[in-house]
């Protein structure tokens, strides 16, 4: 554990060409990206894509990006990572290239930067986080997922998996 949560958790984020974060709310294909941390690499896999290997201790250039209402310091992870996300997120649901893809970039949180959670939600306590929605730990349980799926199915919707939420505990 670190003061921003689990070590290296929520340390990377995909942004659009204006440096604004994107999420699976608007880009559901993000839920298909499977990250794997190895001793010196972050490996990203997704359907129809070759694995993307990124060295954990290597970044490209410093950039400023926006997550919700916060502008934060980050590091761009380079053109190869940007092309990988642009290609993958531009695919149609059938896995075919989309027309005129939007450009995306992968960035890494600058650990020298401090991003605070909203004190309205932390009872006035200072709580640091990286690129998470607002909190360093996102906790859920099997019972919660079971309850959500029961409600979805009763409303005629399809059940969901953990990939839809990505809690870290």
Image (cartoon, rainbow, N blue to C red):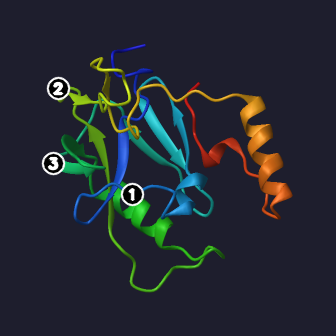
Dot 3: few (<14), some (14–19), or many (≥20) neighbours within 10 Å?
some
* 127 versus 21 height, above or below: above
Question: Upstream in the sequence, badge 1 or badge 2?
Answer: 1
Relative image position of residue 88 (x, y in whole percent) = 50, 65
Q: CA distance from mark 1 to mark 2?
A: 23 Å
Q: Which residue is mark 1?
A: 22
Could you tell me if the residues under marks 3 and 2 are in contact, i.e. CB atoms within 8 Å? Answer: no
Q: Quadrant of the N terminus?
A: top left
Provide the residue designation for mark 2: 112
Q: Residue at x 37, y 63 (%)?
A: 83
For the point 27% across and 35% down, the residue is 58
Front tag of 1 and 2: 1
Residue 2, x across and y down, in percent: 36, 15
- Based on the displayed image, in which of its 4 quarters is residue 114 positioned? top left
Of callouts 3 and 1, the N-terminal one: 1
Q: Is residue 11 left or right of residue 75?
A: right
In this view, 101 is above or below 21:
below
Q: Is residue 94 left or right of residue 137?
A: right
């Amino acid at each position: 554990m670190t003061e921003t949560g689990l070590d290296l958790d929520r340390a990377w984020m995909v942004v659009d060409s204006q440096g604004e974060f994107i999420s699976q709310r608007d880009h559901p294909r993000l839920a298909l990206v499977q990250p794997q941390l190895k001793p010196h690499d972050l490996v990203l896999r997704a359907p129809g894509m070759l694995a993307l290997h990124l060295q954990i201790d290597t970044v490209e250039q410093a950039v400023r990006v926006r997550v919700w209402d916060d502008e934060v310091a980050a590091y761009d992870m380079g053109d190869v990572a940007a092309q990988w996300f642009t290609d993958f997120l531009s695919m149609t649901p059938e896995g075919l290239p989309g027309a005129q893809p939007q450009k995306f970039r992968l960035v890494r949180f600058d650990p020298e930067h401090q991003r605070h959670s909203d004190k309205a939600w932390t009872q006035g306590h200072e709580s640091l986080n990286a690129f998470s929605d607002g909190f360093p730990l996102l906790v859920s349980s099997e019972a919660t997922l079971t309850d959500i799926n029961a409600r979805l199915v009763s409303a005629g919707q399809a059940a969901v998996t953990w990939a839809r939420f990505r809690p870290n505990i």
